[in-house]
Amino acid sequence: MRSDETPTLSPAATPTRAPSLPAPSPWLLRIVTLGLVLAALNLRPAITSLGPLLEEVRDGLHMSGSVAGVLTSVPPLCFALFGFTAPRLARRFGAGAVVCAGMVAIAAGLVLRPFVGGTAGFLAASALALMGIAVSNILMPVIVKRWFPDRVGTMTGLYSMALALGTALAAALTVPLTDALGGNWRTGLVVWAALAAVAVLPWLPLVRDRAPGSGQPRGQAPQPAPALRITRSRTSWALACFFGLQATAAYITMQWMPQIFRDAGVSAGTAGVLLAVTMAMGVPLAFVIPRVAARLKNQGAIALVLGGCGLVGYAGLYLAPAGGAWLWALLLGIANCAFPLALTMIGMRARTGAGVVRLSAFAQSTGYLIAAPGPLLVGVLYQHSGGWGLPIALMAALLVPQMVAGVLAGRDRTIEDEC
């Protein structure tokens, strides 16, 4: 068993403290912590606010089922494409500045997308918000590594919990807010821009802090970036596959689960609450799972337990979607906690800050490329089969390779050793 917070730098690789990089003040660490929490709150509302209103958006923009499927595939595709740029942007401008710009992009995209008119404009504005989410997604582990190198599990759990909370709030409150503000889906979507605007503020003092782009822990001398050929690491590929398959399940759930329940006779408001229950399971578990994972040498058992909950949840969704709706929502919420597990393993599978940057960008960007076709395929299967049986079977089948990849990614080794 490991200690509660597993060091991500081996003793042999521990750098000397540089006098030019003093330890940050407690107030600055509080600002970084607040920034992490507020940023994490904004990493999913652009997506989960759309799911409960997808039917209204489709009608309002005259979308077919296949086009709606394309819309649901936009998030992981944008995360993959823009995520690859995050390390380069962070090296040039600093991770804090990039995350600050990301929050600005999220706010702008959420303001624009309900009102630009037409499907193309909606997709373009959504892509702007998702670009901000993408770079922030990649840089969250880097920020943690930089400012809290001795508390990776705790801080990963904190922002994962905030991310799950933002996800759940958007799913639960979008329909009630829409009704309270006149029943127009455009107004119900735009309100989430205010949360992103608030998240810009704590990152402003960090805009000039350029060093976090390297991922080097604060107060330590800079290290040269290791010459890693990350594609030669089996662990990096296993982690990318695990991340991609869990992202596939998560985005299918966020975009299509409310529609599954609505087609089973559940009201729109209740379907949104059920999605919120699924997302809310990540609030406590996203804090607990990283701390437990950081204590273990091998995280494969956690991946198996989460996958097993998903299999039971999909079986119930297939057999009795309305009758056991609350139980299936709970089980799928537990299964979706593979996300904080993946983030924790990113911090544990590299010894150095530069290694975490490379692994985070590779695993998340490659993973989102793997995830991109999933929501689209579900939409096409739903339209052409006329029901949810085949799509749900696909979702369940994808959990098997996810569990295998999780076992392989959870082994106690680092990419530096493999490369």
Image (tube, rainbow, N blue to C red):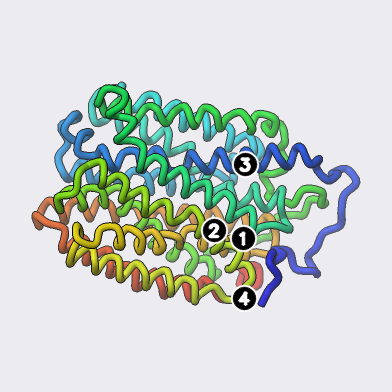
Report the residue marked by disc 2.
343
Residue 233 in the image: state x and y as whole percent.
55, 69
| Label 1–label 2 contact, CB within 8 A | yes
* Residue sitting nearer the eye, 356 or 326: 326
Q: Residue at the location (31% across, 23% down)? A: 181
Between marks 1 and 2, how big is the CA–CA gap? Answer: 7 Å
Instruction: Rate crowding at label 1 as few (under 14), some (14 to 19) or many (20 or more) other CA atoms within 10 Å.
Output: many
- Element under label 3? helix
User: Quick check: 351 above or below 202?
Assistant: below
Disc 2 residue type?
Answer: Leu
Q: Which one is in front in this view, the residue at disc 3 or the one at disc 1? A: 1
Q: Which one is in front in this view, the residue at disc 3 or the one at disc 4? A: 4
Disc 1 residue type?
Answer: Gly
Report the residue marked by disc 3.
90
Determine which quarter of the picture holds residue 245.
bottom left
Q: Is residue 175 left or right of residue 111?
A: left
Say whether residue 349 is visible.
no
Q: How many marks?
A: 4
Query: What number is the disc on residue 297?
Result: 4
Query: What number is the disc on residue 403?
Result: none
Residue 355 in the image: state x and y as whole percent.
64, 59
Between marks 4 and 2, how big is the CA–CA gap? Answer: 16 Å
| Label 3–label 4 contact, CB within 8 A | no
Query: What number is the disc on residue 347?
Result: 1
Disc 4 residue type?
Answer: Lys
Determine which quarter of the picture holds residue 45.
top left
